[in-house]
């Protein structure tokens, strides 16, 4: 990308290098990177050069992007040095006697290294330099506008991601951390993202949020809000069972019903036996069942316990007279004692 | 032909690929969230569908569109066993009301009367049911009774019934009836009225429950097609021969809503 921008800057500066060119001359310029196989890396472009050397530099390009730091003309040789945001550029062209052709070299030095390009050019006719200059200025302005828009969009995206990382903690929705929540499993993602200096602020903010998320995941409220998200647990270097084992004893002690009924079948069993007896699903629906603080607990416990029961045999369908008697699993054997538990 | 065979193999592979984290949920089950299969067990196993067959009866009635017509209840319809309204031979009912009783109460007398009204006879209606099932790609389904009574050779699968349920999601009238907690109907002459509750125990009890159909016969066991919607997310659960169908439906729906 940076190479391309340097090449673009070079094209814009050709008229300056061709100081001896006549007003409104059309030049065909071919650039080649040495060492590249034939047919690869070559670029030919026609450039209209102004007869007035003062007008040959695109103003916007000179003042806002590249600054001329040195400029020489000696016989049929011209040289120019430019300092651009992307790096330093040195051009040297040698013309033939008729000044209808030249050969030159362009050397670009940037943080990524040094690139040399060879150029050859020939005059191909006349052109409207003023119109061309205006057209080029418009192109540059357009590119600058697009570049500014792209920068602005990237800034907005980064801000949005920082906001989403904060939201991930508030909502305990791990997915909102996006790629920044996958650094443990896929360090290559984060290395790639971290290599862009613009992303460092996002990386730092989201890493802090991810740590906060994992801390909250190990609390009853956080675990409930995260809905025991197994992928989040994995991303935090935990497992759902491990967190349940950490939290269930405390939840049982404090009778944290919402957590117990949902995630701690063994610890919830004594409470279920005491408070969930006779809570027939259909009776509850009809308003005949008890409606108290244990209602939701029983609903969560009984549905979880029911799903946790032993697999049904693969034999053909043989419905039991009393469906509740089909329960064989240890947990459900316990709750099966609660008469009228499973309404039909 | 080869392409169909390859597709069938692919479909079978996909069905087998679904996770079965709740092997005790029922003899067969299928859970879909926004059309994507989350979990399944024996979803392609042919089993007795019980009153879930009435979903097809309702679909055909809605597609037929002659719901303002008046049906005379036949003696055979009035004799229908199982869940029933208590219709008598000769009662005249609007087809729309028979449909309501079929969906809300799963009434077999109303269902039979509706089938006879639309096709002339139960047997002709069953032909239509099978033709529609075939058109919908319900390859493992064969109806013998319009209302789902146990009959030799009658079977469907959790996957096929899920397909049928998904088609019904495009029928607003079905959804209106399926979520209706209670309904009161009258004969055309106004002489008799019938008040009944929805057989779906999830309605009003489970947040977001919409329907869709319950079923029970001695051969099929407890069956249920449950649909619930929360915050724009739609979960469909099909349970066949599931003794604890309500609790299991609640558990499966909860987990499906929580699934990533």
Image (tube, rainbow, N blue to C red):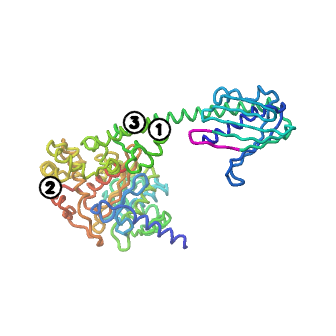
Q: Are marks 1 and 2 on the same chain?
A: yes
What's the magenta region?
A109-117
Viewer-closest of B257 and A322: B257
Marks 3 and 1, how far apart at CA: 10 Å
Asked which secondary structure carries label 1, the reply is helix
The residue at the point 63 percent across, 32 percent down is A84
x, y (%) of residue B52? 36, 61
* Among numbered discs 1 and 2, the one appearing first in the sequence: 1
The residue at the point 69 percent across, 29 percent down is A70
Near mark 1 (Cα within 10 A), the count class, few <14, some 14-19 or many ≥20, is: some
Q: Quadrant of the N terminus of chain A?
A: top right
Marks 1 and 2, how far apart at CA: 58 Å
Near mark 2 (Cα within 10 A), the count class, few <14, some 14-19 or many ≥20, is: some
Q: Would residue B79 be seen by someone viewing this image from the given angle? A: no
The mark found on residue A199 in the picture is 1
Asked which secondary structure carries label 2, the reply is loop
* Among numbered discs 3 and 1, the one appearing first in the sequence: 1
**Closer to viewer: mark 2 or mark 3:** 3
Q: Tell me if A70 is positioned left or right of B129 in this view.
A: right
The residue at the point 20 percent across, 63 percent down is A327
x, y (%) of residue B98? 39, 55
Asked which secondary structure carries label 3, the reply is helix
x, y (%) of residue B66? 48, 55
A205 versus B172 height, above or below: above
Viewer-closest of A71 and B197: A71
Q: Which residue is mark 3?
A: A205
The mark found on residue A338 in the picture is 2
**Label 1 marks which chain's residue?**
A
């Amino acid at each position: 990308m940076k190479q391309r921008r340097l090449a673009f800057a070079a094209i814009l500066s050709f008229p300056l290098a061709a100081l001896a060119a006549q007003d409104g001359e059309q030049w065909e310029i071919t650039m080649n990177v040495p060492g590249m196989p034939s047919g690869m890396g070559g670029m030919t472009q026609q450039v209209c050069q102004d007869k007035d050397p003062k007008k040959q530099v695109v103003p916007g390009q000179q003042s806002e992007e590249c600054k001329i730091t040195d400029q020489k003309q000696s016989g049929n040789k011209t040289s120019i040095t430019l300092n651009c945001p992307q790096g330093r550029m040195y051009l040297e062209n040698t013309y033939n006697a008729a000044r209808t052709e030249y050969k030159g070299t362009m050397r670009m030095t940037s943080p990524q290294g040094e690139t040399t390009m060879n150029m050859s050019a020939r005059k191909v006719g006349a052109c409207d330099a003023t119109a061309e200059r205006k057209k080029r200025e418009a192109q540059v302005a357009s590119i600058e506008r697009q570049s500014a828009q792209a920068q602005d969009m990237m800034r907005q995206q980064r801000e949005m991601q920082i906001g989403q990382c904060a939201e991930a903690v508030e909502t305990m929705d791990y997915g909102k951390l996006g790629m920044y929540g996958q650094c443990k499993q896929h360090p290559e993602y984060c290395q790639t993202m971290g290599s862009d200096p613009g992303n460092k602020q996002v990386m730092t903010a989201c890493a802090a949020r991810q740590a906060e998320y994992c801390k909250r995941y190990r609390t009853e409220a956080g675990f409930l809000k995260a809905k025991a998200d197994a992928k989040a647990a994995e991303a935090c270097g935990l497992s759902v069972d491990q967190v349940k084992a950490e939290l269930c004893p405390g939840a049982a002690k404090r009778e944290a019903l919402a957590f117990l009924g949902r995630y701690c079948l063994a610890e919830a069993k004594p409470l279920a036996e005491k408070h969930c007896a006779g809570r027939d699903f259909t009776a509850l629906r009809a308003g005949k069942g008890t409606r108290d603080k244990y209602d939701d607990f029983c609903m969560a416990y009984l549905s979880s316990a029911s799903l946790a029961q032993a697999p049904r045999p693969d034999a053909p369908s043989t419905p039991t007279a009393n469906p509740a008697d089909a329960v064989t699993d240890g947990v459900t054997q316990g709750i099966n004692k609660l008469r009228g538990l499973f309404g039909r | 032909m080869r392409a169909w065979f390859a597709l069938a193999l692919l479909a079978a592979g996909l069905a087998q690929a679904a996770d079965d984290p709740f092997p005790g949920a029922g003899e067969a089950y299928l859970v879909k969230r926004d059309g994507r299969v989350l979990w399944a067990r024996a979803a392609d196993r042919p089993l007795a569908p019980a009153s879930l067959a009435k979903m097809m009866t309702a679909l055909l009635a809605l597609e037929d569109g002659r719901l303002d017509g008046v049906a005379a209840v036949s003696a055979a319809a009035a004799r229908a066993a199982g869940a029933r309204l208590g219709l008598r031979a000769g009662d005249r009912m609007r087809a729309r009301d028979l449909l309501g009783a079929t969906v809300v109460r799963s009434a077999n007398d109303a269902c039979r009367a509706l089938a006879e009204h639309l096709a002339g006879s139960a047997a002709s209606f069953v032909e239509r049911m099978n033709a529609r099932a075939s058109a919908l790609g319900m390859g493992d389904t064969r109806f013998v009774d319009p209302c789902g009574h146990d009959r030799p050779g009658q079977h469907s699968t959790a996957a096929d019934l899920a397909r049928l349920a998904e088609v019904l999601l495009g029928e607003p009238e079905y959804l209106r009836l399926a979520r209706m907690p209670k309904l009161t109907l009258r004969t055309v002459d106004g002489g008799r009225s019938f008040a009944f509750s929805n057989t779906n125990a999830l309605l009003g009890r489970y947040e977001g429950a919409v329907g869709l159909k319950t079923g029970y016969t001695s051969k099929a066991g407890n069956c249920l097609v449950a649909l619930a919607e929360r915050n724009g997310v739609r979960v469909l659960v099909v349970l066949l021969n599931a003794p604890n169908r309500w609790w299991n439906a609640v558990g499966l729906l909860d987990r499906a809503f929580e699934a990533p």
